[in-house]
Image: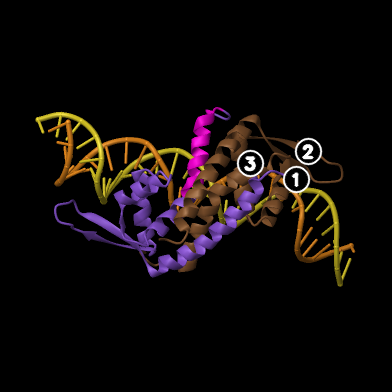
Chain colours: A brown, B purple, C orange, D yellow
Amino acid sequence: MVNDFPTTLVYENLASELRRGLLVLAVLAECDVPQYGYLLKQSLSQRGLDIPEGTLYPLLRRLEEQGLLVSQWQLADESRPRRYYQISAQGQTALAQLTSEWHHLSRSLNDLLSPKE
Amino acid sequence: MVNDFPTTLVYENLASELRRGLLVLAVLAECDVPQYGYLLKQSLSQRGLDIPEGTLYPLLRRLEEQGLLVSQWQLADESRPRRYYQISAQGQTALAQLTSEWHHLSRSLNDLLSPKE
DNA sequence: TGACAATACTGTGCTATATATAGTATAGTG
DNA sequence: CACTATACTATATATAGCACAGTATTGTCA
């Protein structure tokens, strides 16, 4: 099995790993305004962050379970019920910390990736 | 169990998730020059990317298994044997792709995190 | 009217992976 | 001579993305 990985598969895998951690930050940041899953998927996609439903919905539930998001069903007339998620106070604290960590990390990585001496 | 997470634990968790995907990129980039685990750990730590041994060593083996790194034992006299890892041709391709993906993602995320309209 | 795509979500199970933990062993230092 | 730093291996567990499948409604186009 060793070394039998098609290059594209390996790459896809690594790329999604890269994306993975950033999604939490992105979702938390977007949820400063109430959002429901499908809308979120689309707005993130527009920003270049494609995320499959199978990842997004579980992520939203997980973040709610951890107390970073709160949600409620909303029955706008004439439309399907939607579950709206919004960031909690706890979530805002986490978002602030994560954002600063993000800036730190991205700076480190950019240094590392920039052309060497 | 729901909602019983101490905030710090949740945060630690998310922060390490954030770091996780970036490590692969960082390691690949550093291995343009032969590196061994312990040295890598230290140079990354200096750059602000702390990575426990329990994460780094398995990562190196995994990347070699996937054909992105190659390694060999080296017995410098007077010192303990070290396993040196270096990026492979395949690895360089992956690194290039990942780097461009990284720039793309970090731009998206920075947009998202920057003050709103 | 009837089919098909888009919308909007839930649930289950697989697999990949980080991390904790423990263990081995040598070199240097006080 | 003990302790710390160095340098690595191995195993077990828990987490979480993602694929896949399912449900159901709304809108559209022919």
Say whether mark 2 and mark 1 are on the same chain. no
* Label 2: element kind: strand
The residue most toward the front is A117
Q: Is residue A116 left or right of residue A70?
A: left
Type of secondary structure dominating the magenta stretch = helix
What secondary structure is found at the residue carrying circle 1?
Answer: loop
Q: What segment carries the magenta color?
A: B4-20
Q: Position of residue A81 (x, y in %)?
A: 78, 42
Q: Could one spot residue A5 in this view of the protein?
A: no
Q: Amino acid at mark 3?
A: Leu
Gap in Å between the C-alphas at discs 3 and 1? 17 Å
Of circles 1 and 2, the one toward us is 1
Secondary element type, mark 3: helix
- Whether the magenta-drawn stretch holds residue B96 is answered as no
* Residue at 48 percent of width and 52 percent of height: A109
Amino acid at circle 2: Gln
Which disc is residue A74 wearing? 2
